Amino acid sequence: MKLVVTIPALNEEKTIAHVVNGIPRNLPGIHDVEVIVVNDGSTDRTAEAAEAAGAMVVNVKGRPGLGTIFRIGVERAMRRGADIICNIDGDGQFDPRDIAKLVDPLLRDEADFVTCSRFADPELRPTMPRVKFWGNRVVTGLINWVCGGTRFSDVSCGFRAFNREAAYRMTLFGRFTYTQECFIDLFSKGMRIHEVPLRVRGVREHGKSRIASSILKYGTNSLPIILRAMRDIQPLKFFGGIGMLLFIPGLIAGLCVTGWYFYTGLVEHRYRTTPFTSLITVSGVLVTLAFVMGVLALLADMLGRHRKISEEMLYLARRRIYSSRRTMRVVLPSEEVPHQTMGPTLHDSWALPVMRSIPPSAIQADSNGEREHLEPSSEAPSRSTRRSTVNPTTAASSSVKV
């Protein structure tokens, strides 16, 4: 079993070496541990400190956002042949020694996705500003509602671990953050989610958080990600809910006008709608919009089924690509090349900003016709290995996309 620990880092020069050195290398059931630091355009010596501590450093330019940085880390971990991927922040708020507790449910095959919970155990609740605590409660309640009544206690913690199956299945799009979208995406795909209560430092020792520095900023950037995830994963519930919000007031307005119309006819012997005549127009508009949203909900649900088929094909493609021995052997340099020299490939569906071509010399070990290492559960290994064997003549004349 191979564990790859990914660490997103932005100007964490004072803490990154402590985090990297604190990661346990001897874990029961784990035979190989690697650390990848994804440097999000730091202006200090974060990259140098991480590399000196023994981590592989991937430098990303352009500040694409924490969500993109997380996907780059997961993609690089899969290239390194990870069986388990653990993500931990580089600011020192999490104890790296707790990685052993976090990955234990994965090793015992009790979960596919394990996340640290700061609030599940009242005795381990960290000290943090009250507005931040209640903000987490509100977001957690929203995610539990989206996921159909689950009882998660913390959906915003960045200390989490995945097995290979969950990493294959995960498809994220958010740029600002990734934490809540992971829950919605993996829950919708039937992945087993488990929370582990751990002690976490509630306030950073150095610097200020770039993600949660402002509750208003965090909310306005996170809410669209949650809404889009709900729209894509539960379209019937999303658009149907909007339709019901329009239909109920329209129905009430229509019933009020109708009741008043018959009441005046019985009492005054003269049927009239005044002074509520305007409610007829309001009711008609709301009911019509609700009907339109209902039709849109059915169409979105149909598109959602096509999305599931597309994601299943993407899952099979990732499984084939990242289980290849050739993919695992390629050691990527840490510096990023300019975007102009790169073209999109299926391999880089999670990390478009860091695509590159690998020279043939980096994969010559495969030119002797060795079979690729596929997972035991994959079907027809002989056919896939024959197709993916590198031809020495072809490799000598062209580079290979990885």
Image (cartoon, helix red, strand yellow):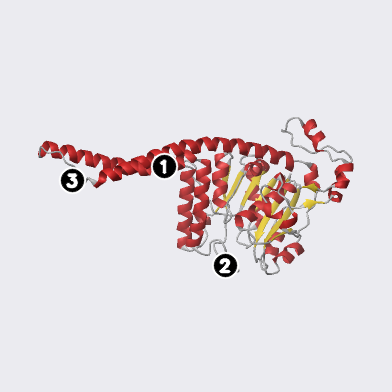
Q: Tell us which disc is closer to us: 2 or 1.
A: 1
Tell me the SS state at disc 1. Answer: helix
Q: Is residue 17 above or below residue 375?
A: below
Tell me the SS state at disc 3. Answer: loop
Q: Are marks 2 and 1 in contact (CB under 8 Å)?
A: no
* Residue furthest top in the image: 380
Identify residue type, mark 2. Answer: Lys
Using the numbered discs, state the Cα–Cα distance from disc 3 to disc 2 in whole angstroms.
Answer: 60 Å
Which of 54/400 is in front? 400
Identify residue type, mark 1. Answer: Gly
Mark 3 or mark 2, earlier in chain: 2
Q: Which residue is mark 2?
A: 208
Q: Position of residue 346 (x, y in %)?
A: 70, 44
Q: Which residue is mark 3?
A: 274
Q: Position of residue 91 (x, y in %)?
A: 62, 63
The quarter holding residue 318 reads top right
Q: Residues within 10 Å of mark 3 (few under 14, many from 20)?
A: few
Q: Tell us which disc is closer to us: 1 or 3.
A: 3
Left or right of 323 on screen, residue 165: left
Q: Position of residue 190 (x, y in %)?
A: 57, 38
Identify residue type, mark 3. Answer: Thr
Tell me the SS state at disc 2. Answer: loop
Residue in the image at 71% along x and 54% along y: 354
Q: Quadrant of the N terminus?
A: top right
Mark 1 or mark 3, earlier in chain: 1
Mark 2 or mark 1, earlier in chain: 2
Q: Which residue is mark 1?
A: 241
Q: Tell us which disc is closer to us: 3 or 2.
A: 3
